[in-house]
């Protein structure tokens, strides 16, 4: 679904650096989510937002922060990247918290 | 919290055969169960979902069944084709007013041999 845009598509980052992954949707969906995908572990929820102005913690929130200043944007920030945060990050959105989620194309992040 | 187990981790079938992937969940309050298909290097795509008030749902060659008592649900693909080859993920979500969030299984890599 072309309505979710993630940037960058990939990034190599030195440990200790700060990094913000961007996610924008143009479908006016209320709910947005950040997942990380690691081999053998499936998709794990990092943070979510059920509506603009609110956020919540998922399964693996440590080391990550999010903000939801408006409906369209949901950036994910790594304040001080560590190698264990090497992963593929997917942003998703849904009309509401109890509606089907649709994913963006992902950001492949490598921390060295 | 919710825990979702998915089996098998890999599945190989001949073209035209059926494929079945099974998931179990731990939280009896879970009420929504989607299935996603992910091709190599691509995004997960929703292929079918079911809510707890329904026991079975079909969409062409794919179907999902839900057994609330046993807390398990399954994906059935009939007349498999090579383009069905992908990783499939199940997920479960609890009640919204109880902080329900989508918890995924570990994935099943399906290979359909021509």
Image (cartoon, rainbow, N blue to C red):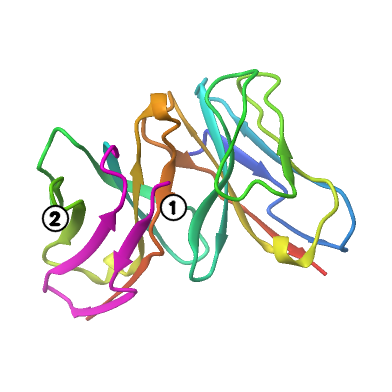
Quarter of the rendering containing residue A111: bottom right
The image quadrant where one finds the C terminus of chain A is bottom right
Q: Position of residue A80 (x, y in %)?
A: 85, 52
Question: Which chain is disc 2 placed on?
Answer: B
| Left-right relation of B55 to B43 | left
Q: Are marks 2 and 1 in contact (CB under 8 Å)?
A: no
**Residue at left 17%, top 66%?**
B20
**Residue at left 52%, top 33%?**
A3
Q: Position of residue B10 (x, y in %)?
A: 32, 77
**Residue at left 61%, top 20%?**
A71
Residue bearing mark 2 = B61
Q: Position of residue B107 (x, y in %)?
A: 38, 65
Stretch in magenta? B1-30
Crowding around mark 2 (Cα neighbors within 10 Å: few <14, some 14 to 19, many 20+) is: few
Residue bearing mark 1 = B44
Crowding around mark 1 (Cα neighbors within 10 Å: few <14, some 14 to 19, many 20+) is: many
Quarter of the rendering containing residue A51: top right
| Left-right relation of A6 to A37 | right
Dot 2 or dot 1: first in sequence order is 1
Which callout, 2 or 1, points to the residue nearer the camera?
1
Location of residue A54 with respect to B90 vertically, above or below: above
Question: Which chain is disc 1 placed on?
Answer: B
The CA span between labels 2 and 1 is: 19 Å
Secondary structure at numbered mark 1: loop
**Residue at left 20%, top 51%?**
B71
Residues tagged by mark 2 and mark 1 found on one chain of the structure: yes
């Amino acid at each position: 679904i072309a309505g979710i845009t993630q940037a960058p598509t990939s990034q190599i980052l030195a440990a200790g650096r700060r990094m913000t992954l961007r996610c924008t949707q143009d479908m006016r969906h209320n709910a947005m989510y950040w997942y990380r995908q690691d081999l053998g572990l499936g998709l794990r929820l990092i943070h979510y937002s059920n509506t603009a102005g609110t956020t919540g913690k998922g399964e693996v929130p440590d080391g990550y922060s999010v903000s939801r200043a408006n409906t369209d944007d949901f950036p994910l920030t790594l304040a001080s990247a560590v190698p264990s945060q090497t992963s593929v990050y997917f942003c998703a959105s849904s009309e509401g918290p109890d509606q089907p989620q649709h994913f963006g194309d992902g950001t492949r992040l490598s921390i060295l | 919290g919710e825990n979702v187990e998915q089996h098998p981790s890999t599945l190989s079938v001949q073209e035209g055969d059926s494929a079945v992937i099974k998931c179990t969940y731990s939280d009896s309050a879970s009420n929504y169960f989607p299935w996603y298909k992910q091709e190599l290097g691509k995004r997960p795509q929703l292929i079918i979902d079911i809510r707890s008030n329904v026991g079975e749902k079909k969409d062409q060659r794919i179907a999902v069944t839900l057994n609330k008592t046993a807390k398990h649900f399954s994906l059935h693909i009939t007349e498999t084709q090579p383009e069905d080859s992908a990783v499939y993920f199940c997920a479960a979500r609890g009640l919204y007013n109880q902080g329900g969030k989508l918890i995924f299984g570990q994935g099943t890599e399906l290979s359909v041999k021509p």
